[in-house]
Image (tube, helix red, strand yellow):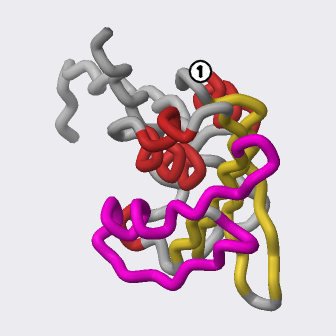
Amino acid sequence: MLSSCVLPAARPQASEPPAEPGISREAAAELLNAVPGLKLSEVGSHISGLSTEAVVEVYIDDDASILAEGVLDYVLRVGWATELPDEPNQISVKVVNGGTLLDLQDEANTIAGVDQTAFPRLFSVHLNPAEYLGGWPGAVPTPPTPPAV
């Protein structure tokens, strides 16, 4: 019988559980409301038949705030990064200024590199599928840089 005086290797430590992807609806609203000109923001979802869509709603006082460089893309990405009860396969955004729903589909199509049909009476933006956003929930984006004054 052979024996040795070798100490056993250190036991592997249990690793911390991975962080949950995405952010809460409350955190998403805080991120959106922190963007100059955006207010009363909400992220939720809507189920229609077999489709689930992420729905972002934002109120503004000036169209320039949503049209500032990087802001619409940021709104879309925050919406896509939000944890929802069911995985969405599309995303819609409602941007309201003084009771008027803005039509931002052309701007969103340019950002996403797609040619999606607009639903101007229902949404400012509707992307189906949201391919440019990647897997859901998406990474939490970096806020857009405010324009220099």
Residue 103: give x, y in percent of width and height.
58, 63
Residue 117: give x, y in percent of width and height.
51, 84
76 is higher (above) or lower (below) than 60: below
Q: Which quadrant of the structure image shows residue 42?
A: top right
Residue 14: give x, y in percent of width and height.
49, 31
Residue at left offset 68%, top offset 67%: 123
Name the residue nearer the viewer: 46 or 144.
Answer: 144
Q: Is residue 59 magenta?
A: no
Q: Which quadrant of the structure image shows residue 121?
A: bottom right
Residue 23: give x, y in percent of width and height.
62, 39
Amino acid at dot 1: Ala
Q: Is residue 144 visible?
A: yes
Name the residue nearer the viewer: 19 or 23.
Answer: 23
Q: Secondary structure at mark 1?
A: loop
Q: Which residues are magenta?
A: 97-123
Tell how many labels.
1
Name the residue nearer the viewer: 63 or 35.
Answer: 63
Residue at left offset 53%, top offset 36%: 19
Residue at left offset 20%, top offset 22%: 6
Name the residue nearer the viewer: 5 or 67.
Answer: 67
Q: Which residue is mark 1?
A: 34
24 is higher (above) or lower (below) than 9: below
From the image, which quarter does the C terminus lie in? Answer: top left
